[in-house]
Amino acid sequence: MKRIAILLLSTLTLLTLLTGCVHEDFGIKLNADGTGSVSARIGIDKDVYNQAISMGADLFADSEAEPTEYEYKGKTYVSVTETTEYASFDELKQALLDLTYETDELAQLNDLEAAGEPVEEEAEALIAEVADLTEDAAQAEEGETEAADDSEETTEAAEDKPSDTVDNHIFKEIMIEKKSGLISESYVFSAKMNAIPDDPDAETPLSSAFLVTVSVEMPSEITNASENATVEGNKATFEISDLTVENEFAVESSQTNVQLIIAVVVVLILALAALLLFTKFHGKEKE
């Protein structure tokens, strides 16, 4: 999940330069065995991505995944996807609640634009900073610098945290529930996303800077979902049109326990067969 957070930081760092050219899709998958995964696909408009490459800035340089292209709403995006697996729904839930938007860099660039100053040099400096953060995150994942990084981040947070710090966590609430009945199982996933305050004086409002979608893949066919969902089989996709307000969505799936039903039917057939044989054998004895 640390690598996903770094990818988010990378895209947000350049939002001022890439207005409307970034698409982020969060993929949440629940498995019937209680495990799950979270993926983050970061897509950048192909023309803008190629322009950034020509300037020596590759946002996906640290990603282990190969960039791929896809179409979304009439645009071609270049993207990478990072996926993290979780051993339980509780672990997956906590990972989602820990996921944050890093918006300090965007605010810094907006301040420069409002002052009429060029942002190219500042953007290049921030790209370098993102590269450093990415390298640190990769080392932390290998267990080499995690303790030192945590201590350093805690110190910096204590020094820099303003009194009116904005909660940059993406998700405010997450609920994952599994209900097991005699002949059926159902799964429920619901979420509430934090509202990200917009700066009305910013040249590039956060609400229009990029597109966000959240897809939830359930263990079985979806039987109920929020009105804003696009449902295909066991997958529901939600388009988050305005990040400056709290967004809520929910999805439910259910499946019949076919194996249990088959087992019950087999037992009943065997019991009936045994009863018939017993009746027939008992009748012969009487004769």
Image (cartoon, helix red, strand yellow):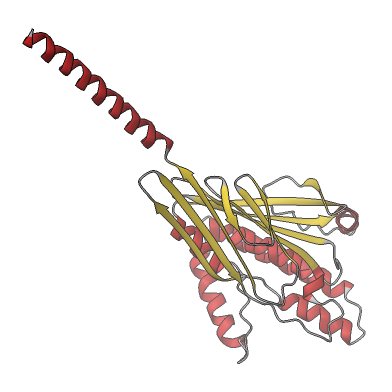
150 horizontally vs 243: left or right: left
Residue 168: tell me if it is visible.
Answer: yes
Q: Is 67 drawn above or below residue 199 in the view shown?
A: above
Q: Position of residue 137 (x, y in %)?
A: 60, 62
In the figure, residue 33 lies in which quadrant? top left
Residue furthest out toward the front: 287
- Up-down: is 155 above or below 279? below
In the displayed structure, would residue 146 be above or below residue 256? below
Residue 150 percent coordinates (x, y)? 52, 71
Residue 134, given in percent of the width and then of the height, sits at 66, 61
Residue at the extreme bottom: 163
Q: Is residue 214 left or right of residue 204?
A: left
- Residue nearest the viewer, comparing 76 with 219: 219
Say which of 4 and 154 sits in front: 4
Residue at the spot 66% in from the left edge and 51% down from the top edge:
231
Give the quarter of the figure containing the N terminus.
bottom right
Q: Is residue 194 above or below residue 33?
A: below
- Residue for point 63% across, 75% down: 194
> 277 and 123: which one is in front?
277
Position of residue 94 in the picture relative to residue 109 (left or right): left
Q: Quadrant of the C terminus?
A: top left
- Where residue 233 sits, quadrant-wise, is top right
Instruction: Please name whichever residue, 64 or 80, is drawn nearer the observer in this view of the structure.
Output: 80
Q: Position of residue 235 (x, y in %)?
A: 62, 49
